[in-house]
Image (cartoon, grey):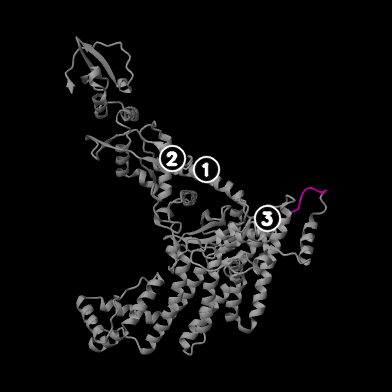
Amino acid sequence: MEISNDSAVKKPKRLTSVVWNHFERVRKADICYAVCVHCNKKLSGSSNSGTTHLRNHLMRCLKRSSTIDVSQLLTAKRRKKDTTLSLTNISFDEGQRKDDYIKPTILKFDQDQKKDEIVNLGSSKFDQERSRLDLARMIILHGYPLAMVDHVGFKVFVKNLQPMFEVVPNSAVEQACMEIYGKEKLKVYEMISKLHGRINLCVEMWSSPENLQYLCLTAHYIDEDWKLQKKILNFLTLDSSHTEDMLSEVINKCLMDWDVDGKLFALTFDNCSTDDDIVKRIKEEISQKRPLLSNGQLFDVRSAVHVLTSIVQDAMEALREVTQKIRGSVKYVRSSQDTQGKFNEIAQQVGINSKKNLLLDCPIRWSSTYLMLEIALEYKGAFSLLQEQDPSYTSTLTDTEWEWVRSVTGYLKLFVEITNVFSSNKCPTANMYFPEICDVHIQLIEWCKSPDNFLSSMALKMKAKFDKYWSKCSLALAVAAILDPRFKMKLVEYYYSQIYGSTALDRIKEVSDGIKELFNAYSICSTMVDQGSALPGSSLPSTSNDTRDRLRGFDKFLHETSLSQNAVSDLDKYLEEPVFPRNCDFNILNWWKVHMPRYPILSMMARDVLGTPMSTVAPESAFNTGGRVLDNCRSSLNADTLQALICTQDWMRMESRDFNPSSSLSALPLLIESN
């Protein structure tokens, strides 16, 4: 209750509540008053009245200092109200104050904190610097534009939420993001440097609406707990001076900056048409530091999903005119309710009972074109009769064209199914690709035998593109499949007999020799580990400065002569044992984790091989015919800021584990715990 102004007499009694920092206790006759030092209002100061009404007045007082730490008042109230916290809820109208309160939550956000460390919003003192960094982390994590701090709505929201927070300008947020990037980069660098296994690198090209080009380098590896991991290392803006010839120099520089050029197992490019000279120059540069395993036979990998999409585009281009007719037919039927109704009646007349509606495709997503053709085939009879009954309908197809559509749709169905297998797997280890790619190979061989010149010529063009991919990646695909205990050499024998026929045995021997050569390299490396000249899976033996050790070559000699003495190696033991039963719950990484003691050397090799990314396409882009395009907001940033935001977002999301790893645009909710 409010008391009228009167003369003040200070009471010398010591007052312990923090609320008395903002009131003077005065006495007039036998009555005690509490006078607000900010607005001079008088309230009851009797000890029987408590301090709740004083605290409530203080939080409503419009003339109080902006430096008051309201959280101290709330802490005192919490002790009296069974740990219930309250914060003043200020409406969007800054001139209005309410008596309502908001219960805060306990928030885990600062990546620098320990996981069990929490921030109590009601009891901690406001920290401008901490809040500035939290704001930067939020912007990084969710991909918000830096300019959001200049938005009026954001400023009002923050003002009402915490009046003491000084909203920082765009440039200050950018600086904070760069600070966080620097700290997080150091963490990633230290983590990679401690890896015992090798890493694999994905090379992806991005573009922007302004036709700028970007280079994204992503490290893929299997960690010490046998979990498949990936981290974006660089996202570089390529200016016009960066010719394709210079791409190898850019990549090599990034590898050296991260100090992974000596730990690289394989390099995966997103495009099969990437110039072989680029890969050659990268291999030559890396080989100067240490020899590549198996002479680099497994080093050059191309994205499986990209090659499938490229092959599909060949089929789409061959059927382009026919597809345009079907697209026109669908548009015509859907142009009005009358036409749609008439078409439905015709469909019933010819006995079509399909419940699917005609679909108009999105040309840049080839899976939607497949669905459009597939559904149109079901209504073939209705389209033929519509031509007779409606003279306005002109997008007609001949019987031959309909047969082409039927055949090509059958081809596309296979590619849709396989692409779905690749893109839906949450742990896409390298072993899963071999059987699917072999199915494509077998089908292409059959399609080339078609008696129809149109279909056979189209299939030959598709197979020529596939053969280029197969020549580069077949050994890597096969080795990964052999390291799947459910398949081993048997799967290679099964598919190669269908693909190569009479020459299958020679091809199988090439694969067998390839995996043995790779295993021998790991065996030599394992021998040298005991001498301290190499780390498991990190590099091959190197020259030592210790001139007294003249027997470095003895380890290699010992290994080679041991093989000739019929010693059973990890690889021989693994291949001779029965295959593991196939089941849907099989986890290959768990299997190898459990069997490490039994196959110590082979498991090192399996870790690196299975971690090879056989595809670089994100699941949401699997069916896109265009490349990956950066949005206008990010493409307007300078090169350093862009790289910092994209890399740090990836690292923070991977650390939190509360996100869809396949989507770079998915929103990650704040980690909130409320009791």
Q: Quadrant of the C terminus?
A: top left
Task: Name the residue beneath numbered marker 1.
Answer: 183
- Which numbered disc flags the more N-terminal residue, 1 or 3? 1
Q: Is residue 392 visible?
A: no
The amino acid type found where label 3 is placed reads Ser
Q: Kindly identify the amino acid type of the residue bearing the numbered disc 2.
A: Leu
Please provide the residue range marked out in magenta. Answer: 539-548
Residue placed under numbered mark 2 in the picture:
133
Whether residue 444 sits left or right of residue 531 in the image: it is left
State how far apart marks 2 and 3 are (Cα): 39 Å
Q: Mark 2 or 3 closer to N-term? A: 2
* Secondary structure beneath label 3: loop
Given residues 174 and 543, the one toward you in this image is 543
Query: SS class of the residue under badge 1?
Result: helix
For residue 258, above or below residue 570: above
**Quarter assignment of residue 284:** bottom right
Residue 609's spot in the image, x, y percent? Answer: 60, 62
For residue 547: magenta?
Answer: yes
State the residue at coordinates (18%, 23%): 1
Who is closer to the viewer here, 312 or 57? 57
Figure check: 430 above or below 658? below
Which one is in front, 541 or 632?
Answer: 541
- Under mark 1, the amino acid is Lys
Q: Which residue lies under the disc numbered 3?
A: 539
* Residue sticking out furthest to the left: 4
**Chief secondary structure of the magenta portion:** loop
